[in-house]
Amino acid sequence: MIVLYVLKTCPYCNSALQLLKENQIKHKAIYVENEQEKELYKKQNGMNTFPQIFMQIDRDNYMKVGGCDDLIEIVNVCKSIRGSNVSLDSIYYMYQNMYSK
């Protein structure tokens, strides 16, 4: 499942939500209601912009995806490998190495 922290008036947030709906990807949107919550999530998640997107790995663990552009990139990669013999382990390895600093 994808978890997104979103602002109601944010065009990038709306684009991310639309992409998930169009591709029938299970997701949960957490709407940030005020400035206090906005600052809390920025600090808690280590991100300054919205949407803040995470992929749920298991019941208690989440992996940071990033923002809308990062989500688009991941969805496109998944579409390109759908039906291939690529393993989930190799996808995870690729993702980790793409973003390692």
Image (cartoon, rainbow, N blue to C red):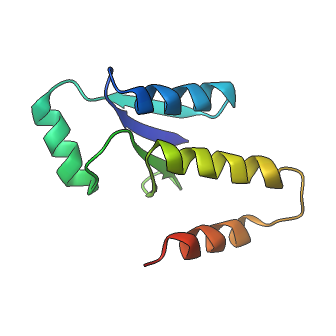
Rendered location of residue 9, percent (x, y): 32, 20
Image quarter of residue 1: top right
Position of residue 44 in the picture relative to residue 74 (left or right)? left
Q: Is residue 2 above or below residue 62?
A: above
Furthest toward the right, the residue is: 84
- Residue at 10% across, 34% down: 36
Q: Is residue 89 above or below residue 36?
A: below
Assign the C terminus to one quadrant of the image: bottom left
Q: How many numbered callouts? A: 0
Position of residue 56 in the picture relative to residue 22 (left or right)? left
Rendered location of residue 64, percent (x, y): 43, 56
Rendered location of residue 12, percent (x, y): 43, 33
- Residue at 70% across, 71% down: 89
Looking at this view, is 85 or 57 the one in front? 85
- Residue at 42% across, 31% down: 13
- Residue at 59% across, 67% down: 95
Image quarter of residue 46: bottom left
Rendered location of residue 61, percent (x, y): 44, 57
Position of residue 24 in the picture relative to residue 96 (left or right)? right
Q: Is residue 69 above or below residue 37?
A: below
Q: Is residue 33 above or below residue 49?
A: above
